[in-house]
Image: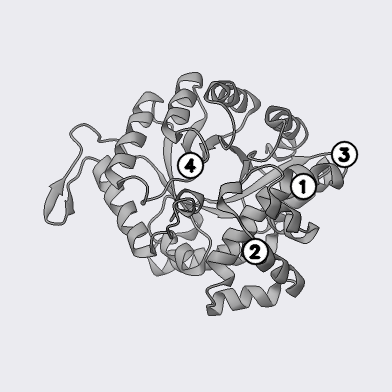
Amino acid sequence: MKINFGVGTGRNQSIDAIKGHARLAEDLGYEHITFIDSQNLCRDVYVMMTLAALETSNIRIGQGVTNPYTRHWTVTANATATVNELSGGRAFIGLGAGMSSVGTLGMKARPLSALKDTVVSMRTMINGGDVDVAGHAVRSEWSTKPVPIFVGSQGPKSMRQAAGMADGIICPSADPTIYKWRREIITQGAEEAGRDPASIPVWARTMCYVGDTREECRRETRSYAATCAAGFYGSVLSRPTPQSEELCRRLDPQLLDEIKKVYDNYDYYEHERTDAPHGELVTDRVIDAFLLVGTADEVAERISNLAEAGCRTVSMTDYTIIDKQGQMRRVAEQILPRFAA
């Protein structure tokens, strides 16, 4: 089974390190690279994307993810279109409602209606069309080439909305039960919008860590598992719907309790930081729900299970991993060849 793999990075590297990281990702065969956009926690996303564009020739480049809150959507559209021109058409927009970027400001994520309006407006502007903003016509004086827009989504309403408008959807998933549930909702949303569900890529956003033992993997992965758990609780479990209640019936009740405990103690200024205090609350069940962790055979088996649930792209982050390039190489050598065809 052919699976594409991507890398998400930029949480704690120096800006000088980004160039080599992007080159290595391309050389190792990763299909895309994304960069975190969290202005209080990392280097600027567009500087990182620009360096990646200059240092590579094939890999796709995008945000992982940006939001319609900390920048005006026209700024995001213009900046990404510029990177697209610089990279020869390899850029895409990764867009979400906002987590750490707005959380560190003491703000809440934008409502779904704002996210939908942002996608429609950015697509129109990047394609060279006029957008009405409070009765004022807004347009780009130079951009005409389309840029794909991928929406980061978790909750049922968000996923259904994204299925009706996005070029692709990025969903935190490692457990095939959760991924299959996501695909069911996305399929429903696509059909409601008159779209072919098979035409919408659904990336499983996760962390992939290959080690000799599970205990070896735990320290460097549990903080990112906490991020996934907090986002999952805030987007899915804290907002009961018939769809979220159905998912709860499919999952271990103990896992749900452990996810809530992480959410209740999550600190945005420790977001995706190795050894973050909230990571101490993460159990093996939580890690397995959101991450691909273990020996090469164990990780490959879990990716195969995701593939059976319909997954064709694994977008893996390296935020809390200490030897990021070493782990990129290990995954490329021990995992990617098993899913090359």
**Is 233 placed left or right of 282 in the picture?**
left
Quick check: can you spot residue 295? yes
To which residue does mark 2 refer? 178
N-term mark: 2 or 3: 2
Q: The disc labelled 3 sits on which kind of residue?
A: Asp
Q: Residue most toward the right? A: 213
Q: Which circle's residue, 1 or 2, is located before the other in the chain?
A: 2
Q: CA distance from mark 4 to mark 2?
A: 31 Å
Residue wearing tag 1:
293
Q: Which residue is mark 4?
A: 40
Element on which disc 4 rests: loop
Q: Earlier in the sequence, mark 4 or mark 3?
A: 4
Q: CA distance from mark 1 to mark 4?
A: 29 Å
Q: What element does badge 1 sit on?
A: strand
Which amino acid, by three-letter code, is at mark 1?
Val
Residue 196 image point, x, y percent: 45, 59
